[in-house]
Amino acid sequence: MKILVDADSCPREVRDLVVRAAERTGVSAVFAANRTIPGIGGKSVRMELCPPGEGKADDRIVLLAEPGDLVLTRDIPLAERVVKASVTALDDRGRVFTPENIGQALSLRNFTLDLVQNGMDFERSDSYGKKDLKRFADSFDRVLTRLVKAAKEKA
């Protein structure tokens, strides 16, 4: 089992938490991005530098992901790809994507994108605060504990 992180848009606080969790549990964490991300490293942690271009890091994550892994991303199309491959996906605010909810999340994302592309303005919350990090940490801990337990039972 491994943790795969879509690191291009991942908040620093989340990256730090994932690095600490990987070191604590011994679970491998792979951070995929088109650029080097500072602060990534350790015994169980590696940076996967992907070629430049739209979706290259996403493609690498999909290639590496296997059932039993955990993918961390705020990219809903990427989450859909890994969920369809029976891989658990979680965003940086603690939302777990499942086969039951990914369609709705993708529809909402596409609807919002259509509004923006057609000149509609709407309020977006891009700030990432302590409440967001707490929700992520709680959800991440629950999901990681469940996946580690399942991997040990399988081995």
Image (cartoon, rainbow, N blue to C red):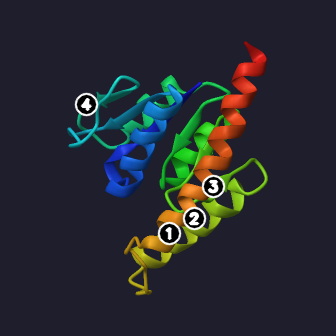
Residue type, numbered disc 2: Arg
Q: How busy is the neighbourhood of tag 2: few (under 14 within 10 Å), some, or many (20 plus)?
A: some
Identify the secondary structure beneath mark 3: helix
The residue that appears at 53% across and 63% down in the rendered structure is 93
Depth check: give the residue in front, 38 or 141.
141
Residue type, numbered disc 1: Asp
The spot of residue 40 in percent (x, y) is 28, 37
Q: Earlier in the sequence, mark 1 or mark 4?
A: 4
Which residue is disc 4 drawn over?
Answer: 51
The spot of residue 96 in percent (x, y) is 66, 53
Which residue is disc 2 drawn over?
Answer: 135
Residues at badges 2 and 3 in contact (C-beta under 8 Å)?
yes
C-alpha span from label 1 to label 4: 30 Å
Residue type, numbered disc 3: Ser
Whether residue 34 is situated above or below residue 74 in the rendered picture: above
Which residue is disc 3 drawn over?
Answer: 139
Residues at badges 2 and 1 in contact (C-beta under 8 Å)?
yes
Q: Which mark is residue 132?
A: 1
